Image (cartoon, rainbow, N blue to C red):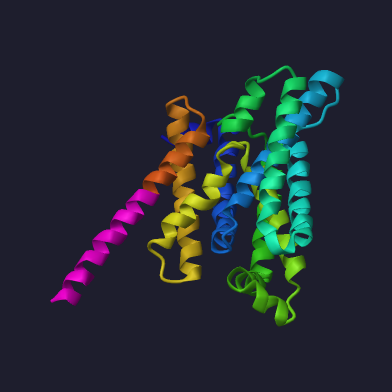
């Protein structure tokens, strides 16, 4: 079934890009979920959509050749910086920064899409993903982003871990919490912008959270949870891409549904494992 993905260049780049995304999305998603910041992915995905719509509008209305992927990435990174700034403005209500940026992204998306005379095939592919949208340049760019993210997480793992579980303690002990958090949220923006080609803007947050939710039911520690989430992410991407291609469906939807199935399976396994323990305790 994978023969086509290695026979044609555009499918090969899509498949390889999917493997990269299957690593970096759950990798950062683990920290996002632990920090209870899952909605950040939704907010940045909508800001990314605004950037994509801006790129399409600029090309259609003004003849400016702005690649939607790069304009989406710029908007996403800008949105991540603004979220961090708003968190410092609303110190007692830092969660307000997320819906503010999300609403801004939705509003700008509607305006740009309207100016560009509505939806077209390109925009639909960005919304829900496509198995034929990844070019060679896109692949190498996402490969570079993947290497950068893995290096940063490796170098700053202790800081990210401490910040995830006790931000106040991290600040007291001298950790540069604001800088680390800004770096982390920028990395999240890059992951979201990188994933839109395959998963789609509206579904990318699912790939960052569902594999983590499944791994939380089975893992016995943080590192194990991270490794399991990456494994589940890769399974979701591979099965989702292949099934989406042969069923002629947008891969974003199939990837998410595979992730849902893995989540339900992990919940079922956890319940089955807990029943014998309850039986032994009652005996």
Give the camera-side residue of 33 and 130.
Answer: 33
Give the camera-side residue of 250 and 151.
Answer: 250
In this view, 187 is above or below 222: above
In this view, 115 is above or below 211: above
Give the camera-side residue of 20 and 90.
Answer: 90
Where the N terminus falls, by quadrant? top left
Where the C terminus falls, by quadrant? bottom left
Stretch of the chain drawn in magenta: 263-283
Image x and y of residue 49, in percent: 68, 35
Image x and y of residue 66, in percent: 81, 31
Position of residue 179 in the picture relative to residue 233 (left or right): right
Image x and y of residue 41, in percent: 62, 49
Residue found at the very far top of the displayed protein: 117
Q: Is residue 142 visible?
A: no
Residue at the image position 71 percent from the left and 76 percent from the top: 171
Position of residue 72 in the picture relative to residue 252 (left or right): right
Residue found at the very far left of the displayed protein: 283
Residue at the image position 78 percent from the left and 43 percent from the top: 74
Q: Is 269 a magenta residue?
A: yes
Image x and y of residue 270, in percent: 31, 61
Give the camera-side residue of 162 and 27.
Answer: 162
Q: Is residue 181 visible?
A: yes
């Amino acid at each position: 079934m994978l023969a086509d993905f290695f026979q044609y260049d555009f499918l090969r780049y899509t498949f390889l890009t999917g493997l990269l995304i299957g690593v970096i999305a759950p990798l950062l998603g683990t920290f996002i979920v632990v920090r209870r910041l899952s909605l950040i992915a939704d907010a940045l995905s909508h800001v990314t959509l605004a950037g994509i719509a801006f790129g399409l509008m600029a090309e259609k209305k003004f003849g400016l050749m702005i690649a939607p992927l790069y304009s989406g990435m710029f908007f996403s990174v800008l949105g991540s910086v603004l979220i961090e700034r708003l968190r410092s403005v609303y110190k007692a209500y830092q969660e307000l920064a997320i819906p503010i940026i999300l609403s801004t992204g939705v509003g700008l998306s509607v305006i740009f899409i309207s100016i560009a005379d509505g939806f077209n095939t390109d925009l639909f592919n960005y919304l829900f993903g496509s198995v034929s949208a990844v070019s060679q340049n896109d692949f190498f760019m996402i490969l570079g982003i993947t290497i950068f993210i893995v290096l940063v997480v490796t170098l700053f793992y202790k800081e990210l871990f401490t910040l995830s579980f006790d931000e106040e303690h991290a600040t007291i002990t001298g950790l540069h919490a604001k800088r680390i958090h800004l770096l982390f949220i920028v990395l999240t923006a890059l992951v979201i912008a990188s994933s839109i080609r395959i998963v789609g803007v509206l579904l990318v947050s699912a790939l960052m959270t569902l594999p983590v939710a499944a791994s939380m039911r089975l893992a016995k520690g943080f590192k194990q949870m991270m490794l399991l989430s990456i494994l589940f992410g890769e399974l979701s991407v591979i099965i989702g891409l292949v099934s989406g291609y042969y069923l002629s469906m947008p891969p974003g939807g199939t990837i998410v549904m595979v992730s849902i199935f893995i989540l339900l399976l992990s919940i079922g396994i956890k319940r089955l494992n807990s029943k014998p323990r309850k039986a032994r305790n009652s005996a």
